[in-house]
C-alpha cells in the first residue's frame, strides 16, 4: 500500500522532498533547511502535512513517515498529561505510528528497530539535558506527575530485544494513570508486538 494513501486515510497530506520541490516547500515552511532535509529529517507540520526529507533508504523513509503520522495522532490531553515532555511525546509518536503500520500490515525490516532505538536514544539524551536545566530552575517546586522511564541502548548486529515501559503516576493520589509498553522479542523477525 502506498504511504500517500495511508496519509490520506488519516486526513494528512504527504510530501517527499526532492530536488525539484525543495525550493517551493522550503519557502512555504521556512524551518526546513536543505542541510536538515539531506540529513534524513522528517517533519510534521501543524496544518496536517507530513514532509519527509531526502532518504537514500526506502525503509528509513517509511519508518519516518509512520513516526510523523504518530505525531498527528497525539492529542492535547496526552501532551498535558506528560507536561509537554518531548521524550514522552516522541515515544508515543513511535508507538502510535507503529500501531498504524501494523494495522495496514506493513512489515519493517530488522534494521528499522535499530534506527528506532537510535532515535529514541537521541531523544533520551536531549531530554536529560532539558530535565537538568528545568531541575535547576524549579528545584523547590512540587511535581504532580512522576514519570518512571527505563531505557537501555546497546549496539547489536542482530535485532535487540526491545522493552520500553513508561508509567505515569499521579503522586498526590499515588495512582498509576497511564502505562505505555512497547516490546519486541529477539525471536520475532520483522515486527513489533504493541500492547
Image: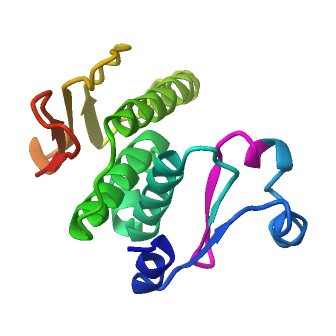
Query: Residue drawn 56% across and 23% down?
Result: 129
Instruction: From this view, report whether residue 79 is shown above or below residue 113.
Output: below
Q: At 52% across and 80% down in the image, what residue appears?
A: 12
59 in magenta: no
Q: Is residue 84 above or below residue 138?
A: below
Q: Which residues are magenta?
A: 36-50
Looking at the picture, how far across and down is residue 6, in whole percent?
A: 41, 77
Residue 48 lies in magenta, yes or no?
yes
Q: Percent x, y for residue 27?
A: 90, 69
* Residue at the spot 40% in from the left edge and 61% down from the top edge: 70
Q: Is residue 25 above or below residue 160?
A: below
Provide residue 74's location: percent of width, then percent of height.
39, 65
Residue 150 placement (x, y as % from top left): 25, 24
Instruction: Describe residue 194's horizontal placement relative to residue 81 as left or right.
Output: left
Residue at left offset 44%, top offset 47%: 90
What is the total number of numbered labels drawn onto the structure image? 0
Quadrant of the snapshot with the N terminus: bottom left
Quadrant of the rendered structure where residue 93 is? bottom left
In the drawing, does residue 19 fall left or right of residue 10? right
Comparing 180 with 170, the one in front is: 180
Which sits in the foreground, 151 or 15? 15
Image color mode? rainbow
Amino acid at each position: 500500500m502506498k504511504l500517500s494513501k495511508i496519509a490520506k486515510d488519516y486526513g494528512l497530506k504527504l510530501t517527499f522532498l526532492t530536488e525539484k520541490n525543495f525550493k517551493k516547500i522550503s519557502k512555504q515552511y521556512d524551518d526546513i533547511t536543505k542541510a536538515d532535509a539531506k540529513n534524513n529529517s522528517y517533519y510534521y507540520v501543524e496544518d496536517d502535512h507530513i514532509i519527509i526529507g531526502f532518504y537514500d533508504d526506502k525503509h528509513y523513509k517509511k519508518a519516518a513517515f509512520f513516526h510523523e503520522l504518530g505525531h498527528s495522532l497525539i492529542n492535547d490531553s496526552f501532551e498535558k498529561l506528560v507536561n509537554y515532555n518531548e521524550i514522552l511525546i516522541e515515544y508515543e509518536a513511535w508507538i502510535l505510528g507503529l500501531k498504524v503500520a501494523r494495522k495496514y500490515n506493513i512489515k519493517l525490516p530488522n534494521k528499522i528497530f535499530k534506527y528506532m532505538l537510535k532515535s529514541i536514544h537521541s531523544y533520551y539524551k536531549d531530554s536529560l539535558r532539558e530535565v537538568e536545566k528545568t531541575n535547576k530552575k524549579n528545584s523547590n517546586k512540587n511535581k504532580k506527575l512522576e514519570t518512571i522511564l527505563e531505557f537501555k541502548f546497546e549496539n547489536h548486529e542482530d535485532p535487540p530485544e526491545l522493552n520500553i515501559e513508561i508509567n505515569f503516576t499521579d503522586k498526590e493520589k499515588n495512582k498509576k494513570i497511564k502505562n505505555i509498553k512497547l516490546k519486541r522479542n529477539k525471536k520475532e523477525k520483522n515486527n513489533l508486538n504493541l500492547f
